[in-house]
Amino acid sequence: MNVFLIRNNQSVSTAITILMSFFVGLYINLLTKQLESVGFIDSIQNLSWKNLLLVLVVALLIFQIYTLNIAKKVMKSKQEPLINAILEAASKSLVHPKSNLHIRAIVTVCDNKINKRVTRFNYNTDSDPERIAEFDKEFGITGEAFTTKSVILKQLPTTHHRGYNSSTQNNVLREIKTILAAPILKSNSANDEPFGILAFDSKHTIEELNWNTQHCIKGIAQEWADILSEILVDNKIN
């Protein structure tokens, strides 16, 4: 049943809408005829079993909501493995052909309820602190990418970890040296803040990663971020 509803979601939803419109129109027509001779309450009472048309409309509305939720649940269940696969492919593409180089990918998404960016997806973080971390929206190099809505590539100073407060230190891997961050944009509007940030980072320097000689590295990062935008923003899933 659920498989049929998912495959024919649009057709089923359209059919339900048509049926609801028909039954509502029919009920209003019957009620109007009754109102010509008696009051509103009496009209409803005189309709007797025909009032079940309203019950049927409510049932159809509930069923329509159910069919729409099924599609969302299926999309959400497929989302995480899809994005994890994208992050793995993106990370490997940035260090190819040197597959032995350390690289991670982390997607932080804005949570406006707490006004922070929280880690939603990641690749190669294992038990690293960023795996379940949250940051101020403007924090660090990823925050610079967030505020400027542009790709930022920077190498961290060797003492970077000492400059963080204790809470932030617990959320940042000490050994990280290089960060490449791209905004996941909601739209091209200057008034829209980014949906989140796609960040690639590594224990290697920019030179060791060979990113200093790859002039298109920022463009590649943004292209991967745009792919994530198509999935996360357009489908309104986070």
Image (cartoon, rainbow, N blue to C red):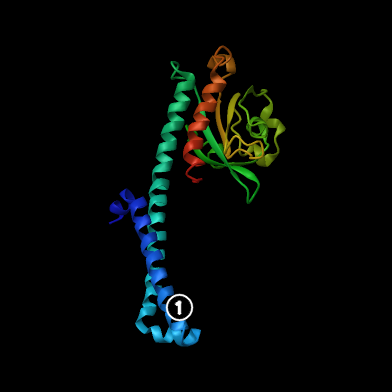
Which residue appears farthest toward the front when viewing the image? 36
Residue 124 left/right relative to 55: right
Residue 176 visible in the current orientation: no
Number of marks: 1
Front position in the image: 175 or 130: 130
The quadrant of the image that shows the N terminus is bottom left
Front position in the image: 39 or 206: 39
Front position in the image: 224 or 10: 10
> Residue 51's spot in the image, x, y percent?
39, 79
**Residue 19 sits in quarter:** bottom left
Front position in the image: 164 or 27: 27
> Residue 59's spot in the image, x, y percent?
38, 68
Residue 119 visible in the current orientation: yes
Position above or below: 37 against 118: below
**Residue 83 sits in quarter:** top left
Element class at badge 1? helix
* Residue identifier under label 1: 32
Position above or below: 85 against 36: above
Residue under the image location 45 percent in, 22 percent down: 93
Residue 65 left/right relative to 153: left
Could you classify mark 1 by the number of other residues whose Cα lies within 10 Å: few (under 14), some (14-19), or many (20 or more)? few
Q: Amino acid at mark 1?
A: Thr
